[in-house]
Image: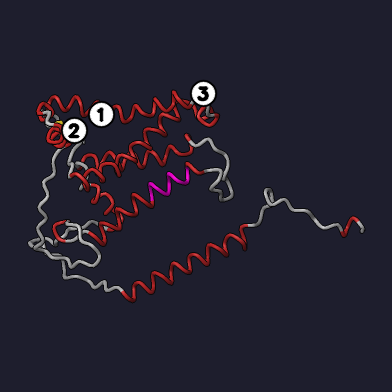
Amino acid sequence: MADSETPEVIDPKTDKVHTWPHLVRAEFICGLLIFIGLFVWSLLLDAPLEEPADPTKTPNPSKAPWYFLGLQEMLVYFDPWMAGVVLPSLIIVGLMLIPYIDINPKGNGYYTWKERKFAIANFCFGFLVLWVSLIIVGVFLRGPGWNFFAPWQEWDPHKVVALTNIDLNIFLADLTGLDFLRNTAIWAVFGLGLIGAYYFSAVIYWKLKSKKSKFLQELGPVRFGITAFLFLTMMALPIKMILRWTFNIKYVVALPWINMNI
């Protein structure tokens, strides 16, 4: 067989394709399917215009635009300064820091899960599981009085939910019988220590894993510290949500002297 007739051997690991038409065609089809889904949904779901705004009549529930409902839902679990200022600021700062703390060059120009498990899993959990789910809850499951309604329940404006939210120290005092935990000043020390221990777990992880992990050695202590702080702060949201849902915990620690509750 002549050299000109020798079939070309293509390595699937290094082979590349052009953006057009391969990528653009797939993105166009995905966009078209989403458009069809939204179009059908708009035909099935009534969304009539309401009456003109009346300053003497407050709607119940009063909801922010859908893209802010994640923040409004977080107000159920955190104080306004935390849900409306600190957490959104950390989200913005965290997104800005990604190019500086992400040292993994793999995945540039191609899609891969195997080589970027931590980054992709973090994004999917933070955006889809947390942020998008909070918006869905705020749009579809929060009714009058900002009460929780299942999809099959009618939004009854007269529904009264008898919930007694308590701080973590009161819960632990009732559970253990240690009445000194009811003291706000004493619990402030314990509570802040508990939060400090939560973040200090990153230091322990670094001490245990850094010498054995090549990835952590390349990441370095500064980038690891920033990543761990943002990750633990993100995980604090579902932890606080679970505490509220299961034990009606309102605050982990309350600092009434400076009007700050966590």
Q: Nearer the viewer, mark 3 or mark 2?
A: 3
The C terminus, quarter of image: top left
**As rendered, which of 73 and 153 lies closer to the eye?**
153
**As rendered, which of 211 and 45 lies closer to the eye?**
211
- For marks 3 and 2, the one nearer the N-term is 3
Determine contact: label 3, label 2, CB under 8 Å.
no
- For marks 1 and 2, the one nearer the N-term is 1
Q: CA distance from mark 3 to mark 2?
A: 35 Å
Queried whether the magenta region covers residue 181, the answer comes back as no
Say few, some or many: other residues with alpha carbon within 10 Å of mark 3 (under 14 / 14 to 19 / 20 or more): few
Q: Position of residue 80 (x, y in %)?
A: 20, 43
Question: Mark 1 sits on what residue?
Answer: 194
**As rendered, which of 53 and 192 lies closer to the eye?**
192
Q: Report the magenta residues as a range.
A: 119-127
What amino acid type is highlighted by mark number 3? Lys
Residue visible at 78% across and 53% down?
9
Q: Which mark is residue 211?
A: 3
The N terminus, quarter of image: bottom right
What amino acid type is highlighted by mark number 1? Leu
Residue visible at 25% across and 47% down?
74
- Horizontal side of 119 relative to 40 (left or right) equals right
Question: Mark 2 sits on what residue?
Answer: 253
Quarter of the figure with residue 66:
bottom left
- Horizontal side of 67 relative to 100 (left or right) equals left
Q: Residue furthest bottom?
A: 43
**As rendered, which of 178 and 256 lies closer to the eye?**
178
As displayed, is residue 80 above or below residue 24?
A: above
